[in-house]
Amino acid sequence: MATVVNMPRLSDTMEEGVVAQWLKKVGDKIEEGDILAEIETDKATMEFESFHEGVLLHIGVQEGETSPVDKLLAIIGEEDEDISGLLSGGNSSEEKEEEKTVTSEEIKEDTSSDNSSSEATVIPDGVQVITMPRLSDTMTDGTVASWLKKEGDSVEEGDILAEIETDKATMEFECFYEGTILYIGVQEGETAPVDSLLTIIGPAGTNVSAIIAGGVAIGATSSVANSTETEIEKKEDKVEATKAPDVHTTINNSGGRIFASPLAKKIAADKGINLANVAGSGENGRIIKKDVENYIPAVKPTEAAVSSVAPVVSFTTEGEEKSEEIKNSQMRKAIAKSLGSSKFSAPDFSLNIEVNMDSAMASRKTINSIPDTKVSFNDMVVKACAMALQKHPQVNTSWTDNNTIYHSHIHVGVAVAVDDGLLVPVVKHTNHMSLTQIGATVRDLAGKARKKKISPVEMQGSTFTVSNLGMFGIENFTSIINQPNSAILSVGAIVEKPVVKNGQIVVGNTMKLTLTCDHRTVDGAVGAQFLQTLKTFIENPVTMLA
């Protein structure tokens, strides 16, 4: 059944987007997780991922064209499916099926209550409804790490309202309005879907109880209701606004509405499922039939496990047994999804090589003797990788079902360990940077990552990744490919050991490297040739000083 994909809101201030490039064309098969297009927002050019599978039946915004948020971007469905109704402004076939469950009595009730309910949807002058922003391209929900303002506080444009934990980092959320905080919908430590009610700002003393009770379409940041709602959903919302709320249609604690199709609500009621616990996969987080049918109740965590921060574990005495569950942070969930997808979808293989580091150690010592200059061994490896990728472009690729994408730019991702997991800042155009420039950039990005101040755009677009555990004394390890890259290099520790030089056993310094490759794009011989070139650059650092 056809699904309408609208122009997404990829940043908190985005009002419209420009399609910089389509990575799929009409007729292509689409899998969940495929990158459909690159979309230019008001802040950056970002990859837009598909959350549906099927065939790309229609493209509504051509490359270079601009479209407002929530306008038709594409349609995905079954091959040769008739989408003329959608193109003329109708609903998707799934929505049509679900709309049938709205009874004539509800429509009559809707008609009779139009006047009273329309009054409830009016936002008072000067009031701004602020929703959970989408602070990264893959963010589906966010956790409020901390509020820097409280109800009753006056705020001005530019003030930081809260710190919000996304799937990639904890980011400051800036206020774009001035007034008084009238209501906070998501408390510290709570998680809410993108576009759900976060806070309300307006003139002090303004009554916003109607908004909190759900009399307005939550998901709009002004008095204009969300344009992606179907007419039947608007009618349903008006009808329900006149009824007492129940557990299946109200978000606990936040006061915001849960948007779900009539059929999804019916199935949930029959199965005794609380919709507040169901993640919606429809537009703007709307819960549809398949979400309820596929819902698996989560095990309730203990009270001591509500924090996403790693706990201090006190071990039991002999003879005791005790376990506790800790809520997964947004970052850990994103890491699990990404690496799981990579490991189970890419047929990978690994190649190992040992590099003589004597010349590299001598060169680094000379370079670092220059005032205000600092270059690490990892910087040298990153530079060598960028130069080797130029000579072996097949390693600088990405796989799609229909094409292998050869990147003419080289962006090296550098894995950085942080408290909650792993982030991969990206050194853009690495092949055009000197060793000292690479060193300064890596230190800057790594510092931001550890402080959770790094922006999504600084972690996007890598074409190759380097992961280094040498500083922990790890001599050899294998990494999981950071998709959509075709390869990742694992860097071990420099070890002093006996080596053979000119037929004599002498003391030397070596480092082991492991290249993990996606066999769909990189064959064994290609990977081996890449490592040989990489070894040559590292063992002869003078070649990297140009």
Image: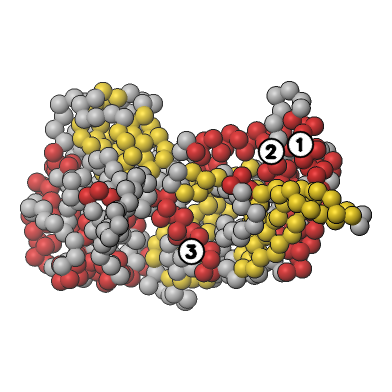
Residue to which mark 3 is pinned: 340
- For label 3, the SS is helix
Mark 2 and mark 1 residues within 8 Å of each other at the beta carbon? yes
Q: Give whichever of discs 2 and 1 has the lower sequence position.
A: 1
At a point 28% along the width and 67% down the height, the residue shown is 295
At a point 49% along the width and 38% down the height, the residue shown is 450
At a point 20% along the width and 51% down the height, the residue shown is 251
**Which residue is situated farthest in the front direction here?**
318
Residue 405 percent coordinates (x, y): 65, 61
Q: Identity of the amino acid at label 1? A: Arg
Mark 3 and mark 2 residues within 8 Å of each other at the beta carbon? no
* Residue 364: assigned label: 1
How far separated are the C-alphas under marks 2 and 1? 7 Å
Q: Identity of the amino acid at label 3? A: Gly
Q: Give whichever of discs 3 and 2 has the lower sequence position.
A: 3
- For label 2, the SS is loop
Discs 3/2, front = 2
Q: Is residue 280 visible?
A: yes
Q: Identity of the amino acid at label 2? A: Ser
The 10 Å Cα crowd at callout 2, few under 14, some 14 to 19, many 20 or more, is some
Residue to which mark 2 is pinned: 376
Name the image colouring: secondary structure
- For label 1, the SS is helix
